[in-house]
C-alpha cells in the first residue's frame, strides 16, 4: 500500500483522472479508522467460525491428500501422486462420467417440470393454484433420506404398488432396481424431490415482473404462449441460471439417494457409483483417508470449475458481467 | 476506551464459549446406557450390539467390585466399524473394549488398533474355547480378541412346503439341486432358496466348504499375504450356483433387505441355509406365515461320506489400543461372557450360539428345545456337530474391500455378464492389484 505522502503530490498535480483511477478515500481521519476497527469487530465472530470450520478443515484435508498411507507400509509424503492416481483411476472416472450423464438427463428434467408448473401457476389466480403450488413444493420439505427410503419401498417388488398396477394391465412387473433401470429410478427420485423447490424460485421471479409489461404485450397482440416464451422467460433468465447452477452442483455431488438405494440394490449400485460415494467408501470402509481426501479435493475442484465455467458462459443472462 | 476493550473481550469470550461447547461433549464417553453399580471401581467402556446385552452388563457389574462396564450400542456391524475406524484415525474416541466380528479382526490389528491379549492372560481362558474358535481370534502367536458367539451353519427348512411337493430334506448339494428342479417343475409359487450376491461371509463360507482357503495371512509377517480366491473348490461351488441361477431355480435377491426378510418367512424360499444365529434372526421377523413348520438339518454336503462343516459370522470382544486401563479391559473381554448365568441370557434372550465350552458342552444347551422349531433340539441335531467340526478361518486385513469386490463379481455373474470362472479370476486379479497397491508382498 502506498503512503499518503506519496499520493498527495499526485493529486496536487491536478490530474482529475488520477482521482478516478484511485478512488481511495482519505484514511487519515481518526474517526474513520475507529469505524474500520468496529467493522472488524463485527465480522470477527463469523471469521473465527469460518476459519475454524471451513478454512482449517480444507487445509487439513488438502495436507492429508499429499500423503499416502497403505495398510502394510505406513504413511509417506508423496506430493501430488494421489491426484495423478485419481485422474487415472477408472473407478473415479466412471463415477465422473456417470454424474455427467445424470446432469445431462436430470437437470433438464427438473427444469422442465419446474418451469412448466411455475408458468401455469403464474397465469392462474384461483385457490386451486395456491393449493397446487403447495402440493408441488411438499416433496422438497421431506428430508432427502426419508424421501429416498420412501421411494425404495415404492420400487420394492414385494411392498411396492408396481406389481399390482402392472399385473392389472397384464404387463410383467419391471425391476426398478436392476443395473439398467436404477439410473432412471434415481432420476425420478431427484426430479420428484427438487422440482418443487426450483418451481418456487422461478415462480417468485415471475411474480416480480411488472404486470404492466403483460398488458403492453396483450395490446400488441401477443397470445399466452408468446407472452410466456418472449417476455416471461427472458425476464427470469437470471433466476434460471441460479437454478441450473444449484442443480449442477447438487448433481455433481450426487450422494444421498444412491447411498440409500444401495441398501436394497448392492449389485446395481456399487461402492463407487458416484465420485462422492467413492470418496466415502475409501475413507470409511477401506480406511484410505489420504486417497479419499485427494478424490474429494479433485471432485471439489471439478465442481468449482464446472460451475465457474457455467456462470461464465451465462454471464449475460445472469447479469453477473 | 476501557469500556470498548471490555466489549471486545466479551465478544471474544462468547465466541470462545460457543466453540468450546462442542469439545465439552467429549466427556460423554462416561455416559453409559447401563447403571454403574460400584461407582468407585475402574470403568471400562464397551461398544456392543448384542440383543439383551444390558442384562449381561448388569450381571457383570453386580458380580465385580473392582471393574465396571460402561456400555454403549454404537451401531451394528459396519456402522460400528466405521466409527471405530474413524476413532483410530483420529487417535481418540474409541472404547476400551469393542465387539468385533472375527472377520474384521485382521483389518483392525494391522492398523495397530487392537491389543495383543497374550500379555493380559489370554492363555488362561484358551482352554474354554474350541481350537477353531481360538484360531479365528489369533494370528500367529498373537491373540487379538476373546471369542463370544459363533455361526456354525445348518439348513433351516419349511417342512410344510417340502412335504407339499413330496421333497425330502436334501443332505447333499446334488439333492438340493434336484429338489430345486422338482419345486419349479411342480409350479410352486416360491423357489427352493436364495443366492444373494451380497452374501459376503455367507458366500465365502459356501466356497470354504469345497476347500477354498482364500487368504494366507499371519501377523508375525504383516506385509505378506497369500490370495487364492479362484481355486478349483470355489470355481466348482460358484458354477453350481450359477447353473441354478441361470435355470431360475434359485432367487438372487439381496440379503438383509426388507424384501428379503419378508421372503424368508412368507414361504418364498423353502430353505434358508443359515448360521446358528439364523433361528434368532427368523424369530425376530414380522409377517411370518402363521402355519409355517420350520425344522433344522445339517448343511448339505458335497461328499456325504466326508462332511465339511462351515461357519458364518460370529463375534468377539477385543481390547482397543486406546484403552486407558488395558488390564481392566482384558478382564472385561475375558469375563463378560464367562459365566453360565451370562450365557443363559445370551442363549435364551439373544439367541446366541456360545463358543464358551462350559456352556457349549453342557446338557442344558444340548437338550434345549426350541419352540420355533416345534420343540426340536436343534443344537443336538445340527449345530453342535457343525461347531465341533469347524477348524477356523483366516480373513484378509482388507476384508471389507474383498467382500465389496466379491459382491460386484457375483452380481455381474448373475446378470449373465460373466461366467462363474471368469468372475472368480477377475476377483483374484482385483484383490492382487489392491494388495500390491497397499504395499503387501504377494506370497
Image (cartoon, rainbow, N blue to C red):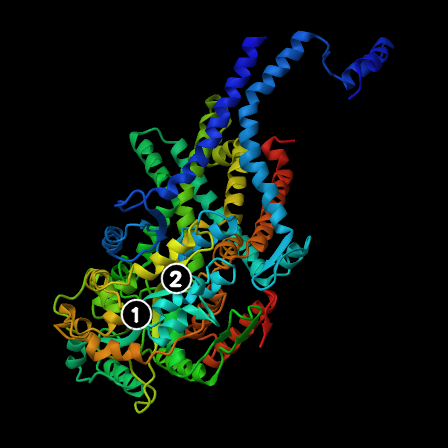
Residue A315 occupies quadrant: top right
Which residue is located at x 33 percent, y 35 percent?
A134
Q: Which subunit holds the residue at mark 1?
A: B
Q: Is residue B126 left or right of residue B232?
A: left
- The residue wearing badge 1 is B355
Q: Residues within 10 Å of mark 1 (few under 14, many from 20)?
A: many
Locate residue B396, reporting x and y percent: 48, 69
Decide which of B224, A81 is in the foreground and name it: B224
Residue at the bottom extreme, as displayed: B305
Residue drawn at x 41%, y 37% is: B25
Q: Nearer the viewer, residue A254 or A206?
A: A254
The quarter of the rendered structure image containing the N terminus of chain A is top right
Q: Which mark is residue A137?
A: none
Q: Is residue B70 visible?
A: yes
Q: Nearer the viewer, residue B50 or B129?
A: B129
Label disc, if present, on residue A265 of the rendered structure: 2
Residue B209's x, y, as percent?
37, 81
Dot 2 surroundings within 10 Å: few (below 14), some, or many (20 or more)?
A: many
Report helix, strand or loop for mark 1.
loop
Q: Residue at left 36%, top 72%? A: B133
Closer to the eye: label 1 or 2: 1
Amino acid at each position: 500500500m502506498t503512503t499518503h505522502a506519496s499520493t498527495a503530490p499526485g493529486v496536487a498535480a491536478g490530474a482529475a483522472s488520477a482521482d478516478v483511477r484511485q478512488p481511495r478515500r482519505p484514511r487519515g481521519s481518526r474517526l474513520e479508522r475507529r469505524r474500520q476497527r468496529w467493522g472488524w469487530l463485527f465480522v470477527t465472530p463469523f471469521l473465527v467460525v469460518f476459519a475454524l470450520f471451513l478454512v482449517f478443515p480444507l487445509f487439513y484435508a488438502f495436507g492429508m491428500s499429499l500423503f499416502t498411507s497403505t495398510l502394510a507400509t505406513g504413511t509417506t509424503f508423496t506430493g501430488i501422486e494421489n491426484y495423478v492416481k485419481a485422474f487415472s483411476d477408472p473407478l473415479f472416472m466412471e463415477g465422473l462420467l456417470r454424474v455427467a450423464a445424470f446432469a445431462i438427463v436430470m437437470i433438464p428434467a427438473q427444469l422442465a417440470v419446474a418451469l412448466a408448473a411455475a408458468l401455469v401457476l403464474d397465469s392462474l389466480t384461483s385457490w386451486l393454484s395456491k393449493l397446487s403450488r403447495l402440493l408441488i413444493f411438499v416433496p422438497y420439505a421431506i428430508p432427502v433420506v426419508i424421501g429416498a427410503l420412501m421411494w425404495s419401498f415404492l420400487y420394492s417388488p414385494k411392498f411396492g404398488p408396481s406389481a399390482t398396477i402392472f399385473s392389472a394391465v397384464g404387463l410383467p412387473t419391471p425391476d426398478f432396481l436392476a443395473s439398467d433401470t436404477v439410473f432412471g429410478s434415481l432420476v425420478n427420485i431427484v426430479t420428484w424431490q427438487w422440482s418443487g423447490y426450483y418451481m418456487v424460485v422461478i415462480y417468485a421471479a415471475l411474480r416480480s415482473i411488472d404486470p404492466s409489461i403483460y398488458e403492453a404485450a396483450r395490446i400488441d397482440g401477443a397470445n399466452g404462449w408468446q407472452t410466456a416464451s418472449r417476455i416471461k422467460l427472458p425476464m427470469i433468465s437470471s433466476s434460471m441460471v441460479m437454478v441450473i447452477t444449484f442443480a449442477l452442483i447438487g448433481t455433481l455431488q450426487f450422494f444421498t439417494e444412491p447411498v440409500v438405494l444401495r441398501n436394497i440394490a448392492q449389485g446395481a449400485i456399487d461402492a463407487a457409483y458416484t465420485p462422492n460415494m467413492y470418496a466415502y467408501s475409501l475413507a470409511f470402509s477401506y480406511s484410505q483417508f489420504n486417497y479419499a481426501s485427494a478424490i474429494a479435493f479433485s471432485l471439489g475442484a471439478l465442481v468449482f470449475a464446472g460451475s465457474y465455467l457455467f456462470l461464465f458462459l451465462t454471464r449475460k443472462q445472469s447479469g453477473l458481467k | 476506551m476501557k469500556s470498548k476493550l471490555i466489549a471486545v473481550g466479551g465478544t471474544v469470550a462468547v465466541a470462545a464459549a460457543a466453540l468450546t461447547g462442542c469439545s465439552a461433549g467429549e466427556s460423554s464417553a462416561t455416559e453409559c446406557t447401563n447403571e454403574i453399580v460400584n461407582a468407585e471401581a475402574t470403568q471400562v467402556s464397551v461398544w456392543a450390539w448384542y440383543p439383551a446385552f444390558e442384562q449381561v452388563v448388569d450381571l457383570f457389574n453386580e458380580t465385580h467390585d473392582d471393574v465396571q462396564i460402561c456400555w454403549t450400542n454404537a451401531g451394528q456391524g459396519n456402522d460400528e466399524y466405521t466409527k471405530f475406524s474413524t476413532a483410530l484415525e483420529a487417535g481418540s474416541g474409541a472404547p476400551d473394549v469393542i465387539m468385533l466380528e472375527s472377520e474384521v479382526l485382521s483389518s483392525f490389528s494391522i492398523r495397530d488398533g487392537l491389543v495383543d491379549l497374550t500379555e493380559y492372560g489370554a492363555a488362561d481362558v484358551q482352554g474354554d474355547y474350541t481350537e477353531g474358535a481360538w484360531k479365528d481370534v489369533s494370528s500367529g502367536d498373537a491373540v487379538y480378541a476373546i471369542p463370544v458367539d459363533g455361526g456354525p451353519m445348518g439348513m433351516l427348512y419349511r417342512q410344510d412346503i417340502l412335504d407339499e411337493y413330496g421333497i425330502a430334506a436334501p443332505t447333499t448339494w446334488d439333492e438340493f439341486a434336484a429338489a430345486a428342479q422338482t419345486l419349479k417343475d411342480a409350479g410352486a409359487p416360491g423357489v427352493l432358496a436364495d443366492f444373494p450376491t451380497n452374501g459376503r461371509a455367507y458366500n465365502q463360507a459356501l466356497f470354504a466348504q469345497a476347500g477354498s482357503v482364500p487368504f494366507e495371512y499371519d501377523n508375525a509377517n504383516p506385509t505378506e499375504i497369500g490370495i487364492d480366491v479362484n481355486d478349483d473348490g470355489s470355481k466348482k461351488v460358484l458354477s453350481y450356483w450359477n447353473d441354478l441361477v441361470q435355470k431360475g431355480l434359485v432367487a438372487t435377491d439381496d440379503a438383509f433387505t426388507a424384501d428379503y426378510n419378508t421372503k424368508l418367512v412368507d414361504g418364498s424360499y423353502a430353505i434358508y441355509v443359515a448360521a446358528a444365529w439364523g433361528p434368532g434372526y427368523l424369530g425376530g421377523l414380522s409377517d411370518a406365515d402363521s402355519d409355517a413348520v420350520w425344522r433344522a438339518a445339517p448343511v448339505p454336503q458335497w461328499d456325504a461320506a466326508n462332511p465339511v462343516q462351515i461357519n458364518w459370522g460370529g463375534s468377539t470382544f477385543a481390547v482397543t489400543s486406546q484403552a486407558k486401563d488395558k488390564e481392566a479391559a482384558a478382564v472385561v473381554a475375558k469375563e463378560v461372557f464367562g459365566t453360565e448365568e451370562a450365557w443363559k441370557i445370551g442363549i435364551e434372550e439373544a439367541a446366541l450360539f456360545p463358543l464358551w465350552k462350559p456352556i457349549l458342552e453342557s446338557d442344558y444347551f444340548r437338550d434345549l428345545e426350541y419352540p420355533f422349531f416345534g420343540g426340536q433340539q436343534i443344537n443336538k441335531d445340527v449345530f453342535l456337530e457343525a461347531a465341533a467340526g469347524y477348524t477356523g478361518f483366516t480373513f484378509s486385513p482388507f476384508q471389507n474391500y474383498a467382500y465389496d469386490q466379491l459382491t460386484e463379481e457375483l452380481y455381474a455373474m448373475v446378470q449373465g455378464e460373466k461366467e462363474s470362472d471368469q468372475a472368480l479370476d477377475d476377483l483374484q486379479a482385483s484383490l492382487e492389484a489392491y494388495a500390491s497397491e497397499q504395499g503387501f508382498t504377494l506370497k
